[in-house]
Amino acid sequence: MPGVSHVTPSVQVWGSQGGVTYRDQSVPTQVFGSASSYQSLNAVYCEDGRFINQSDDDSRRRVAVIGSSVVSELEIPGNPVGQHIQILGEWFKIICVAETRGELFGFDQDDFVLIPFTTAKSILGDRSWRTNVTISMSVDDVNQLTQVKRYITSVLRRAHGIKDGDPNDFQINSADQMLETFGSIIGGTTLVLGGIVGISLLVGGIGIMNIMLVSVTERTREIGIQKALGATKFDILLQFLIEAVFLCLLGGLVGLILGFAGGSIISSIANLPPASVPIWAIALSFGFSALIGLIFGIIPAAKASNLDPIDALRYE
């Protein structure tokens, strides 16, 4: 096929979620069939043993490549290569333990069992596998992606006997589409979270302003004494602004501590990698806290600085 460097079919072995068994231990995992080309296309390499080859596929051999998570869950002792597991009542010989790849967006990339494509077809039967097959491929030049997709669409429509004007009975997805979809999700999430943060800042700022206004009222005589002793309007203004900023910075610090603690708890419960927060983000959060203190502290500070010292001293 012009413009395509690697092609590999794969099919989900439906029903395998019921369990892969080793001795008396059974665990649910993702089981699918594919060809030897799956290795180069998806960068899956063996830590022990060998990968599925063309001979395995041609002979419909009962062999399997398993991820490291499956090895751990099945508690297979020693070297798993050469031992046997059971899938849908069929015995398979382990020929490869894949290198650990870790998690991606919370998905365990090591929780899988791979068997030859033709073996999966024979287990599923002709009718079942035809409706569940996926063909993955990589292009030589990403700039030719649109042309390759157009060519593949025309080939599949002819092969499926689809008439002009009729919808496709297949779906073609590309990495750029998935990235675009992911970007849209991230953008929408960011917008929603931004709105929540904005409302929280507004409510928090109003709360700070109310606290400072109450403080000004309670400290009216104190302000009068300060002015009588020579304090200027600017001195009083600066004092209350500093207090408002300090309160906001204290709230920001508490928020950071709760955020770190909450993130760590969620990561441990969901088995996700710990989040890393850059220094600039911490500095930005404190900067916003200080800004909120300045904006919402200006009204109470101005009220305090404009108090008449005589009236303030008379205040009970």
Image (cartoon, rainbow, N blue to C red):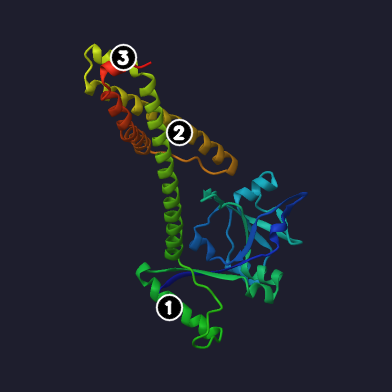
Q: Quadrant of the C terminus?
A: top left
Q: Tell me if I can see residue 238 in this picture.
A: no
Q: Amino acid at mark 2?
A: Gly
Q: Quadrant of residue 288?
A: top left
Could you tell me which residue is drawn at 52 percent across and 88 percent down? 163
Cα separation, mark 1 vs mark 2, equals 51 Å
Identified at 60% across, 49% down, the residue is 68
Query: Marks 3 and 2, how far apart in space?
Result: 39 Å
**Residue 206 at x, y = what percent?**
40, 36
Instruction: Write down the residue under mark 1.
Output: 150
- Residue at (66, 61) in percent of width and height: 63
In the depicted view, which residue is nearer to us: 285 or 106? 285
Give the residue pinned by disc 3: 313
Q: Amino acid at mark 3?
A: Leu
Q: Quadrant of the N terminus?
A: bottom left
Q: Is residue 215 left or right of residue 14?
A: left
Lateral position of residue 58 relative to residue 295, left or right: right
Residue that mark 2 sits on? 255
